[in-house]
């Protein structure tokens, strides 16, 4: 089974086309709306729209999506008709199959309505023209000589009694996004030690610091307090995006006090200590959060 649990919701669009060829006389009668079964194109348009909405019932691995718009148009060619479908939604998965299904069923409807007068029709060239949406639309270029750090805050991990999983997940994900120079640091849950390490990394010119651990309500959870003493400006939208994303998966996400902020041009991101919470937080904000460096460089949105 294919799952989309950690995908983000974005505006997604797809455009597909299909071409059906026919005899000149059939073509003329379609244009004149004089076929035995009536107005071919309007019925084909309706069929295409309905088909897009029914796609999950026809294609096993297609997910049910609330479509925000389906548009089916026709273009008269020299020897046939070109059908184009535009489908739009806000969701976790793309709508290319909905667009392809729409043009396919519209073409079949034209074929069905015209087959009494034309046995030589042919449906050909059904294809996806373009699609947009998803994380691939938000890939950001990493600045030259960019440096990052992963800071694990945990008494148990620093004492060697607990294996670090979340820090390694963050390290691997940052590498996946093209960041090569990454420091990996493990600290106990001591506020002053965490604060001093964050300051050291900022002064060293590290562009991104991602902490994991110390964001909960435990008596030793002090990473957020240490971070608050270091940052100059808070970036609340990033932290709220992580919490909102996690809240849809577990009610415990609301208990994370994670903070995100800037010291100079260093972005500091607090993530939970659990491996699951870390994976969800990364899925919620990366790679889009890397756009912040373009903004800090004066590039705007």
Image: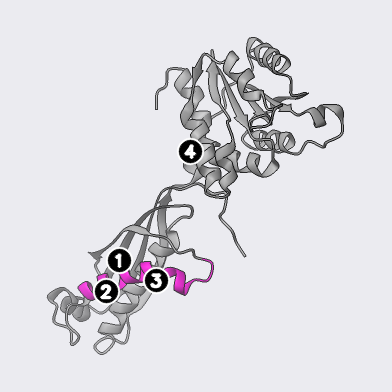
Which residue position holds label 2?
44
- Measured Cα–Cα span from mark 3 to mark 4: 29 Å
Look at the numbered discs 2 and 3 and tell me whether their residues touch, using CB distance below 8 Å: no
Q: Is disc 3 in contact with disc 4, using a CB cutoff of under 8 Å?
A: no
* 54 in the magenta segment: yes
- The answer to whether 248 is drawn above or below residue 211 in the figure is below
Q: Position of residue 223 (x, y in %)?
A: 66, 24
Bounds of the magenta segment: 41-61
C-alpha gap between disc 4 and disc 2: 36 Å
**Residue on which the image places disc 1:** 83
Which tag, 1 or 4, sits closer to the chain's start? 1
10 Å crowding of disc 4: few (<14), some (14-19), many (20+): some
Which quadrant would residue 301 be assigned to in this image?
A: top left
Of circles 4 and 2, the one toward us is 4
Is 55 located above or below residue 130 in the figure? below
Q: Nearer the observer, disc 1 or disc 2?
A: 2
Q: Nearer the viewer, residue 166 or 257?
A: 257
Q: Main secondary structure of the magenta part?
A: helix
Please state the horizontal and vertical placement of residue 38, each as a whole percent of the image: 17, 82
Mark 4 lies on residue: 138
Decide: few, some or many residues near mark 3? Use Cα within 10 Å; few <14, some 14-19, many ≥20: some
Packing grade of label 2 (10 A; few <14, some 14-19, many >=20) is many
| Distance of label 1 from label 2 (alpha carbons) | 9 Å
Can you give x and y, in whole percent of width and height, for residue 262 in the image? 53, 18
């Amino acid at each position: 089974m294919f799952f989309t649990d950690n995908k983000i919701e974005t505006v997604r669009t797809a455009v597909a086309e299909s071409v059906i060829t026919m005899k000149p006389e059939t073509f003329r009668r379609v244009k004149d709306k004089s076929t035995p079964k009536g107005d071919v194109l309007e019925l084909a348009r309706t069929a295409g729209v309905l088909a897009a909405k029914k796609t999950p019932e026809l294609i096993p691995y297609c997910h049910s999506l609330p479509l925000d718009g389906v548009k089916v148009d026709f273009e008269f060619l020299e020897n046939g008709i070109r059908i184009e479908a535009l489908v739009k939604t806000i969701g976790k998965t793309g709508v290319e199959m909905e667009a392809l299904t729409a043009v396919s069923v519209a073409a079949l409807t034209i074929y069905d309505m015209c087959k009494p007068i034309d046995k030589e029709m042919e449906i050909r060239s059904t294809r996806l023209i373009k699609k947009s949406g998803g994380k691939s639309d938000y890939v950001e270029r990493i600045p030259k000589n960019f440096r990052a750090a992963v800071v694990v805050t945990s008494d148990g991990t620093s004492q060697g009694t607990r294996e670090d999983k979340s820090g390694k997940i963050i390290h691997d994900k940052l590498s996946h996004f093209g960041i090569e120079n990454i420091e990996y640091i493990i600290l106990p849950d001591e506020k002053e030690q965490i604060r001093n390490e964050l300051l050291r990394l900022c002064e060293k010119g590290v562009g991104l610091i991602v902490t994991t651990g110390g964001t909960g309500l435990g008596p030793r959870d002090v990473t957020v307090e240490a971070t608050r003493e270091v940052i100059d400006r808070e970036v609340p939208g990033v932290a709220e995006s992580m919490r909102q994303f996690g809240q849809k998966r577990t009610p415990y996400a609301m208990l994370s006090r994670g903070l995100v902020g800037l010291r100079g041009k260093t972005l500091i991101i607090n993530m939970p200590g659990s491996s699951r919470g870390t994976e969800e937080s990364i899925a919620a904000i990366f790679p889009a959060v890397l756009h912040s460096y373009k903004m800090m460089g004066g590039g705007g949105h």
